[in-house]
Image (cartoon, rainbow, N blue to C red):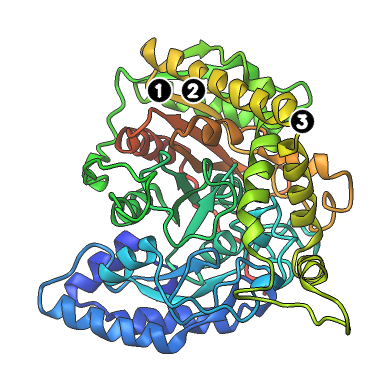
């Protein structure tokens, strides 16, 4: 069977249990697909030896009857997750040659469950970007095309490599991280499912930090059921992460009943932007109608502080980034600049960071250092923290009033061409996160579900936002929306 790489996680899991094929065969099919997809630049460090070793071990576990749900399933790992003995660069030149001597908690959980690592995936440098154009590895490219054009499109960012790989069937699923929409936006751009769980649901230990109070890992998959399967394996309390929640992890897949009768779905009026494309607005309205037809109650809600979300995010995230990235100085690991005779430690810091960090990372570090500096800390950073509290309270009030989930667009447009936005004002790029950053600021779970195609044949996604720690309920509502939308489109192979 040469099309094994096109299976979903749930299909592959069931086939492995029945003995229809082996994990080694699944892995082989994915590695062959990766070899033929160099034009997408999705995988940046291939690990076939590790993959076959893990696949053989998984086959032995399955034969012995000791097989968790993720056992034997080939996945890709975003380059932000520390993988022992395998390059982990966060797509930055400053971490060139860095091979951790430890494994992140998330990848440990996945590998302990028998998952197979095919390799590391492309991303925006230090997860800073919405188009995967800031990577030291070069751009990741979407497997989708706009109409009959040959224009190379963005797979979104920062988890662009993950999105491209899953959409193009190079792997069955992938890990992603989401600081302001970096799982949900690329998922929407490439016609796949991406869930950002509640802050604290997944451990951040061993994940290269961007903005510590916003970062959260999650799965990027071909279906909502797959997201439920993979998320359960990734979740759980971790003593090594002080922000990790000590809460039981439910069987998310068992909660996918498809029954949403009586659920109250909120439609926030503040998300209706003046310049929103008509096809995005139409998709949103149709999504609400589909949930209503499935038995949900649709209500208009207000999230009054939404308009302050983007400026708040772009004060807090760079501030935390400037603090987190201070450790990359050329002293302990990673890139170190060559010094001229007579130059000292200060010159080494300056040269190393100038050579190692890309322009977008430099921009955000400078903005973050500025808002944390004396004289501006209260004017910008402290004020942003207070507004963040108000944004969080907006959601708390809505949920307290009986709303079970909130439906919004995932992105303000379908995927755009590489270079079309990055070469314009950076603010235009930041606007891609307009629907997603509120979820990170409030620490809530959010999921992007593919719901239709644009007039040019590109995927468009809808976002559902849930109550804290209620990923099971959120996944079930998303499962209902997925079934009603009936999205089955795949990109036509050109690579």
* SS category of the residue bearing label 2: helix
For residue 401, above or below residue 490? above
Side of 172 relative to 455 (left or right): left
Quadrant containing the N terminus in the rendered view: bottom left
* SS category of the residue bearing label 1: helix
N-term mark: 3 or 2 = 2
Residue 426 horizontal/vertical position (percent):
83, 45
Q: Which residue is mark 3?
A: 376
Side of 11 relative to 178 (left or right): left
Whether residue 184 is visible, yes or no, is yes
Picture quadrant where residue 190 is located: bottom right
Whether residue 2 is visible, yes or no, is no
Closer mark to the observer between disc 3 and disc 1 = 3
Residue 69 horizontal/vertical position (percent):
24, 62
Closer mark to the observer between disc 3 and disc 2 = 3
How many residues crowd around disc 3 within 10 Å: few (fewer than 14), some, or many (20 or more)? few
Q: Alpha carbon of mark 3 to alpha carbon of mark 2: how far?
A: 47 Å
* SS category of the residue bearing label 3: loop
Residue 3 horizontal/vertical position (percent):
43, 76
Do residues under tags 1 and 2 come within 8 Å of each other at their CB atoms?
A: yes
Q: Which residue is mark 2?
A: 289
Q: Which residue is mark 1?
A: 293
Dot label at residue 94: none
- Front position in the image: 118 or 267: 118
For residue 57, above or below residue 434? below
């Amino acid at each position: 069977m040469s099309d094994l790489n096109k299976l979903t996680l749930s299909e592959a899991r069931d086939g492995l249990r029945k003995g229809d094929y082996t994990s080694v065969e699944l892995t082989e099919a994915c590695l062959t697909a990766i070899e033929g997809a160099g034009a997408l630049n999705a995988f940046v460090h291939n690990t076939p030896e590790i993959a076959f070793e893990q696949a053989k071990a998984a086959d032995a576990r399955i034969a012995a009857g000791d097989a968790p749900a993720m056992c034997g399933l080939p996945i890709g790992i975003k380059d932000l997750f520390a993988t022992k003995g395998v390059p982990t660069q966060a797509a930055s030149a400053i971490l060139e040659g860095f091979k951790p001597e430890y494994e992140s908690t998330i990848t440990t959980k996945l590998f302990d469950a028998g998952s197979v690592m095919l390799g590391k995936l492309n991303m925006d440098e230090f997860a800073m970007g919405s188009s995967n154009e800031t990577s030291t590895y070069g751009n990741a490219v979407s497997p989708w095309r706009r109409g009959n054009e040959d224009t190379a499109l963005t797979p979104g960012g920062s988890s662009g490599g993950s999105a491209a790989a899953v959409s193009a069937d190079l792997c069955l699923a992938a890990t992603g991280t989401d600081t302001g929409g970096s799982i949900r936006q690329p998922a929407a751009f490439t016609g796949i499912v991406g869930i950002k769980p509640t802050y604290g649901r997944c451990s951040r230990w061993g994940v290269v930090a961007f903005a510590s109070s916003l970062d959260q890992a999650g799965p990027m998959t071909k279906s909502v059921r797959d997201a439920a399967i993979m998320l359960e394996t990734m979740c759980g309390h971790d003593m090594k992460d002080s922000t990790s929640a000590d809460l039981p992890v439910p069987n998310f897949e068992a909660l996918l009943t498809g029954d949403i009768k009586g659920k109250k779905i909120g439609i926030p009026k503040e998300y209706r932007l003046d310049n929103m494309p008509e096809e995005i607005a139409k998709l949103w309205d149709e999504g609400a109608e589909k949930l209503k037809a499935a038995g949900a109650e649709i209500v208009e809600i207000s999230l009054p502080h939404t308009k302050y979300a983007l400026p708040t995010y772009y004060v807090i995230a760079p501030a935390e980034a400037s603090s987190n990235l201070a450790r990359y100085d050329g002293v302990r690991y990673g890139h170190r600049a060559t010094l001229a005779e007579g130059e000292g430690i200060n010159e080494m810091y300056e040269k190393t960071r100038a050579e190692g960090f890309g322009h977008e990372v430099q921009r955000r570090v400078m903005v973050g250092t500025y808002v944390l500096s004396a004289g501006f800390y209260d004017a910008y950073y402290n004020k942003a923290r207070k507004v963040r509290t108000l944004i969080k309270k907006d959601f708390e009030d809505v949920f307290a009033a009986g709303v079970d989930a909130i439906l919004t667009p995932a992105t303000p447009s379908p995927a755009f061409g590489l270079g079309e936005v990055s070469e314009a004002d950076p603010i235009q790029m930041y606007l891609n996160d307009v629907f997603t950053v509120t979820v990170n600021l409030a620490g809530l779970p959010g999921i992007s579900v593919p719901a239709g195609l644009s007039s040019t044949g590109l995927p468009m996604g809808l976002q559902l936002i849930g109550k804290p720690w209620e990923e099971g309920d959120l996944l079930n509502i998303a499962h209902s929306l997925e079934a009603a939308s009936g999205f089955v489109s795949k990109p036509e192979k050109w690579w």
